Image (cartoon, helix red, strand yellow):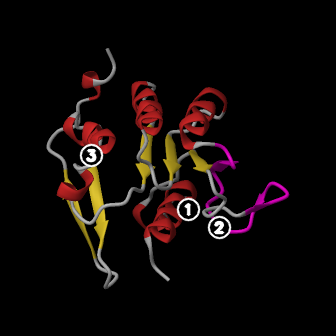
Amino acid sequence: MFGKTTLLRDIIRNISDGIETIRFNGMNVGLVDERGEIAALYRGTPQNDIGIRTDVLENVPKSIGIKMLIRTMAPQIVAADEIGTEKDVEAIKEAVCCGVKGIFTAHGDSKQELMKNPTLRELVDKQIIERIIFLKKNREFYVEEQSERNDNKVCL
């Protein structure tokens, strides 16, 4: 099956492990797995392959987990599934201000659909998001690039 959670897991694994064919050595990833669907920890060990450089916080709200990862694990990238609350967005903005990149999923079939959620709209309007990948039901996807990213709009 191919869905946003599966795609997120695959992206995390590739960023964490690196991709030898393009000489990408990998990066430290911090994953907030609020419902245990991505890493599927069992006694602290991921049952799904999420990469060798991935630290996981499971069963913790995303907004708290993102902040905990930034303060304790020094990730280069934080990841979480299904963002959308004001607290999630505040934690993402804090991560950006700390120089941490993010990979997140959210519900929405188009940019217009995402913009209906005022908290997600803030991430788009302030150009905190660099690109958006939309999955179609037929397993195809398309990428929408944002213009320029400007961290100064949130890090004052």
- Per the image, the residue denoted by label 3 is 130
Residue indicated by mark 2 = 49
**Of residues 93 and 131, which is closer to you in this image?**
93
Q: Quadrant of residue 24?
A: bottom left
Query: Which residue lies at the image location 28% right of the left edge and 41% below the top edge?
Result: 118
Q: Which residues are magenta?
A: 41-60
Q: Residue at x 23, y 58 (%)?
A: 113
> Looking at numbered disc 2 in the image, what kind of residue is underneath it?
Asp
Label 1 sits on residue: 13
The image shows residue 5, relative to residue 113, as above or below, that is below
Residue sitting at the far left: 147
Instruction: Say whether residue 114 is magenta.
Output: no
- Dot 3: what SS? loop
Sequence-earlier tag: 2 or 3: 2
Residue type for callout 3: Glu
Report if the CB atoms under discs 2 and 1 are less than 8 Å apart: yes
From the top left corner, tell me how far across and down residue 112 is, in percent: 17, 56
Q: CA distance from mark 2 to mark 3?
A: 26 Å
The mark nearer the N terminus, 2 or 1, is 1
Marks 2 and 1 sit apart, C-alpha to C-alpha, by 7 Å
Q: Residue furthest top?
A: 156
Quadrant location of the C terminus in the rendered image = top left
